[in-house]
Image (cartoon, rainbow, N blue to C red):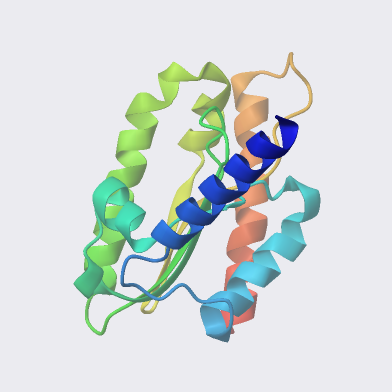
Amino acid sequence: MKKFFAMLMVVCMLAVSACSGNGGGTKVESGKLGDVHTAVKTALGDAYIASMPYDMMYLTEVVGLTEADIKEFVAEGPMMSAHIDTFIGIEAAEGKGEAVEQALQAYLEVLKSDAFMYPMNVAKVETAKILRVDDYVFYICLGGYHENMEATEEECKAFYTEQNELVEKTIHDTLGK
């Protein structure tokens, strides 16, 4: 019986893997976006907990981007819905940087309005940011959680802002801008 459930689990995982994919987009692990993604993960170390890859379908249906606006992307979010850590890096199609930036900003506003569902995330999502460097646009909501359970909201915001600033600096340094 245990072998049956183990095989069933493997089959299910393979089916999910086969059906997933990037939905027609390009998920990069090399090039500038790949370099940025690697540098951000290195800079945050164990505090980088966004580990579930997002595909083009997620970016279009949930985030609100259009496939025509995206040249390449790398995107990861949380495995658990209680967490909000997300990294989205997009190389916009030529002339589409502003459209991508606006879509990511709208997505952030939705998350801010929904943050009350998990009060522990309010300060973190309020410090999330959209960063645009030429045709590269990033959604940044990353870093570990404040360990002091009695920290004030302002202390938490300062902690999360510091982590996002580290990510922003890492992006600028990696892109050379």
Q: Is residue 119 left or right of residue 20?
A: right
Which corner quadrant of the image does residue 123 belong to? Answer: top right
Residue 62 percent location from the top left of the image: 30, 46
Q: Residue at x 46, y 50 (%)?
A: 129
Which corner quadrant of the image does residue 173 belong to? Answer: bottom right
Residue 175 appears in the rendering: yes
Residue 165 percent location from the top left of the image: 62, 55
- Which of the pair 138/169 is nearer the observer? 138
Q: Is residue 62 left or right of residue 173?
A: left
Q: Is residue 105 above or below residue 155?
A: below
Q: Is residue 65 left or right of residue 56?
A: left
Residue 177 appears in the rendering: no
- Which of the pair 80/43 is nearer the observer? 80
- Which of the pair 14/67 is nearer the observer? 14
Where, quadrant-wise, is the N terminus in this rendering? Answer: top right
Q: Residue at x 61, y 26 (%)?
A: 154
- Which of the pair 76/102 is nearer the observer? 76
Q: Residue at x 58, y 21 (%)?
A: 120
Q: Is residue 15 above or below residue 82?
A: below
Total labels: the figure holds 0
Residue 82 percent location from the top left of the image: 54, 27
Where, quadrant-wise, is the C terminus in this rendering? Answer: bottom right
Residue 127 percent location from the top left of the image: 51, 40
